[in-house]
Image (spheres, rainbow, N blue to C red):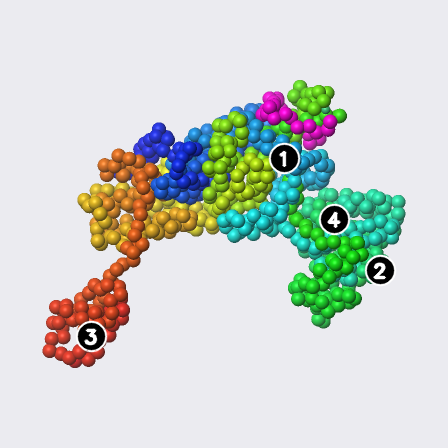
Amino acid sequence: MKYDHKQVEKKWQDIWDEKQCFHAENDSDKEKFYALVEFPYPSGQGLHVGHPRSYTALDIVARKKRMQGYNVLYPMGWDAFGLPTENFAIKNHVHPAEVTKKNIARFKSQLKSLGLSFDWSREINTTDPSYYKWTQWIFLQLFKKGLAYKKEMSVNWCTSCKCVLANEEVVNGVCERCGSEVVHKTKSQWMLAITKYAQRLIDDLDDVDYIERVKIQQRNWIGRSTGAEVDFKTTEGDTLTVYTTRPDTLFGATYMVISPEHPMIEQWADKLNNIEDVRAYREEAARKSDFERTELNKDKTGVKLDGVAAINPVNGKQIPIFVSDYVLMGYGTGAIMAVPAHDDRDWEFAKKFGCEIIEVVSGGEDVQKAAFTAKDETGILVNSDFLNGKTVKDAIPAMIEWLGEKGIGHAKVQYKLRDWVFSRQRYWGEPIPIVKCDKCGYVALPEDQLPLELPNVTSYEPTDNGESPLAHMTDWVNTTCPCCGGPAKRETDTMPQWAGSSWYFLRYMDPHNDKALASPEALKYWSPVDWYNGGMEHTTLHLLYSRFWHKFLYDIGVVPTKEPYAKRTSHGMILGENGEKMSKSRGNVVNPDEIVDTYGADTMRLYEMFIGDFEKAAPWSPKSIKGCRRFLERVWALADKVQDGDTYSEQHEVLMNRTIKKVGEDADNLKANTAIAALMTMLNEFYDKGVNKAEYKTFLALLNPFAPHITEELWQQLGETGLLSVAPWPTYDEAKTVESTVELAVQVNGKLKCTIKLAVDADKQTAIDTALAEEKVQHAIEGKQIVKQIVVPGKIVNLVVK
Ligand code: ANZ
Ligand code: ZN
């Protein structure tokens, strides 16, 4: 019989469905294992060949764990709110919910065709009101604890999407999604106070098993820095506070720089002779992104304040104040003390504006070199009065102490992380369940009014002034205040794309619960996620956001663990054949449906796992797909050669034990590529030396997580009545994973006479005695005298005769 992948794959997918083979039980005495992959955004493009890389890798883990007797939860769902759907809806005049429904249907059938062992009874959809009811509920808890608040702020505004972007969504100064220019705009926004959790988000990384680069990226993104806040008096008698990581360099602070947005500027407006220049400069800066402003190797620009100066508190010297865009309002205090001898940016600025440069950390002949040595904590302070002779390391606390005594400064910890801009002026997102009353201010919608559903509108276009399309819906907007019963208005902003995914893994634990986001029992049993795989691009967005929400839910007693994910891994991207990122414009997109149709899902799965090291990017290669297909055809054809036998034959004993060990360990370490290579070697051995039923069954079991359909079929053809997907995973005997005997060549005067088998640990004399007992050897040395006996352990016995 020929290997007909279409018939085989359809057959087993139907059987798995019908028998609910991958159903995870909530009431189970078994040990649980929760494997999770990032749920997709159901875009109009359908599944990308990159998706199955992550899904198949964890499917292998999930399938193997199931065979090992675990109660496995491996769920799938849809992260379905988002701009592309909304934009499509605007263009084609269809409701985004309709678009979403169609896209999900397509995605689902594509995923099903891959034979992934998802528990489809737990499918979730973030745009379903019964789901976003709980997203809104979590928002209300955040609001009640003061962690959701409204703030006038300068936000990133995408000129094309007409929408506010989070810092994370602005890449190199342009919108991550559409590539258009991003400008600053002041808007009143809902914010989530993720910065309150900054330290815990760093500290608790020590307790989780994340790949190192994920931990590093999160730490860098949160960006903890330690230093001091220092107050400088100005000639106006008021105070300008700076944040510095290097209070030890205070004697070298020869000028100050404040951000163009600094509020003191307008306070000093009357005193400044060049206020118009300063205002013009501020307008120019507003047009630039933070990236452009802080990028290192650019020309420094700025304006010196004419009329107000500062006083360096350590020596009473009057120093100028500049306005420059390299100082950002959003970090520290928006003002700095400039130490040009030891800070690269200050150095460039001082050179251009002719500011004084004083070396305070000894750098030898040239001061600029000192800018580098000063970064080393062993540098020695000079020109610094009471700090002279101290190392940087000792001078920092000494200065902080001095500042404290004078009451003009203190130690300070800063984070780069900003609070999360949590509103969008768009339609296709979760409505924010808040009402604004002139008397009572922002009031939470009572929980029994959740979900607050999106109303049907006729136009999804954002308004030109940046209001959400919901603002047009006066019937919906006008409501009564839950607090005083007076007239009030609903919030018309919706939540950002990242809301629904910040807690979705909890919903899978108990997806149909209408009393809580999930029952305490389900949360207790399934938490935490044992293994979460996803893209590196989500490290500083989704992964951080969901850790934050989870910690908050832990604090209010909803979830039982501090961290949501015990383990995090990340896959490399699948590139086009030419090694470039797959995209329509490059014409190198591979359609997964075609691969499944032509070669089958099992081949597709094997290929995606065989393509290279899981963590690295890999180009698509049609040639190796054919290789994977050929391997499966040989697996199929081997069925005709299987002989009787209930136990492993002696010749294959080591091969069997060794391969079981290897495949199991590799599967647990996301090394599917080397596991498959070991299975290929095994198959070759079977073709060379024969195979019995016991051996073939083990082989099928080992291959099952990788190629589940073909192995189920061959398993059944062997006469098995149970499903292979839930059959026990093969076990091995460590002692039998290594050869117990070795073969040695026996030579007489360098000529090969025969081979002998010896125990691996046999000594030299045993080797010689065994060789001498061989008839061919006896024949060759007959009547001669042995003058030398050479033994190379494990390889050769050579007898030299005369
Ligand atoms: C004096 C100094 C001397 C500094 C020196 C550095 C080196 P991190 O490590 O990133 O926290 N700074 C403070 N606020 C700023 C802002 N809003 N915009 C731009 N720069 C700002 O960096 C903190 C350092 O960056 C601070 O320490 C300050 O310059 C600058 F040899 O103060 B430093
Ligand atoms: Zn009210």
Image point 73% across, 61% down: which residue? 398
The numbered mark, 3 or 2, whose residue comes first in the sequence reads 2
Query: Which x, y percent locates residue 451?
Result: 58, 25
**Cα separation between marks 1 and 2:** 48 Å
In front of the other: 410 or 366:
410
Which circle, 1 or 3, is nearer the viewer?
Answer: 1
Report the residue marked by disc 2: 317
Q: Is residue 712 above or below residue 397?
A: above
Q: CA distance from mark 1 to mark 4?
A: 26 Å
Q: Please state which amino acid type lies under the numbered disc 4.
A: Thr
Q: Is residue 465 magenta?
A: yes
Q: Position of residue 148 (x, y in %)?
A: 66, 35
Q: Does the rendering let one see residue 762?
A: yes
Q: For the point 47% across and 50% down, which residue is it? A: 616
Quarter containing the N terminus: top left
Query: Is 99 in front, or is 56?
Result: 56
Residue 799 is tagged as: 3
Residue 367: % across, % down:
73, 67
For residue 362, above or below residue 399 = below
Question: Vertically, is 705 above or below 243?
Answer: above
What residue span does the magenta drawing correspond to?
440-467
Residue 18 in picture, x, y percent from top left: 35, 28
Which amino acid is tagged 2? Answer: Lys
Is residue 709 found left or right of 621 in the rendered image? left
Q: Is residue 654 or residue 89 the one in the foreground?
A: 654
- Residue carrying label 4: 333
Q: Secondary structure at mark 3?
A: strand
